[in-house]
Amino acid sequence: MDDRRCPCGTGETLAACCGRYLLGLGDAKPAPTAEALMRSRYTAFALGDEAHLLATWHPDTRPESCAPDRGTRWLHLTIDDVVGGSPFHTDGVVEFTAVYRDEAGRGELHERSRFVKADGSWLYVDGVVRTGRGR
């Protein structure tokens, strides 16, 4: 498996962190918490794993496609808040800030995301997004 650092920023290798949840890299095990799923989705955006993004998106809100933008380089992820979303919850909220660089320069995506657990797996429902340019 992959021994490079996981893009989600835990400091773990990709194999020991989000790689085990990604369809394109690992066993595609279900993430145990809403935060773990959110981190794996960030990693999927960073690595271009559209299959993982679609598979972990709630069917009521999932788009037909969500191909990651190859012109965007994801630089850093910060978890700002977590509400619920443990293995013992059925819903949760994860607020995060993702720093990226694209053709227009450096930017930040700040989102408060909602997750639900269905049939033992966490799914992304939707989120309130703010973006901005900085530094």
Image (cartoon, rainbow, N blue to C red):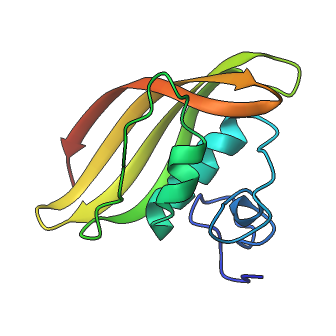
Q: Position of residue 21 (x, y in %)?
A: 73, 56
Q: Which residue is drawn at 68% across and 72% down?
A: 25
In the rendered view, does 12 fall on the left or right side of 52?
Answer: right
**Is residue 75 placed above or below 31 in the rendered structure?**
below
Q: Quadrant of the N terminus?
A: bottom right
In the rendered view, does 43 fall on the left or right side of 19?
Answer: left
**Is residue 76 placed above or below 78 in the rendered structure?**
below
Q: Which residue is drawn at 24% across and 69% down?
A: 71
In the rendered view, does 124 fall on the left or right side of 25?
Answer: left
Depth check, front residue: 109 or 66: 66
Q: Position of residue 81 (x, y in %)?
A: 59, 27
Q: Quadrant of residue 67?
A: bottom left
Residue farthest to the left, as pictured: 104
Q: Residue at x 49, y 69 (%)?
A: 47
**Is residue 75 placed above or below 32 in the rendered structure?**
below
Q: Where is residue 53 in the image (x, y as percent from the top left)?
A: 52, 49
Q: Quadrant of residue 120?
A: top right
Depth check, front residue: 81 or 70: 70
Q: In which quarter of the image is the C terminus?
A: bottom left
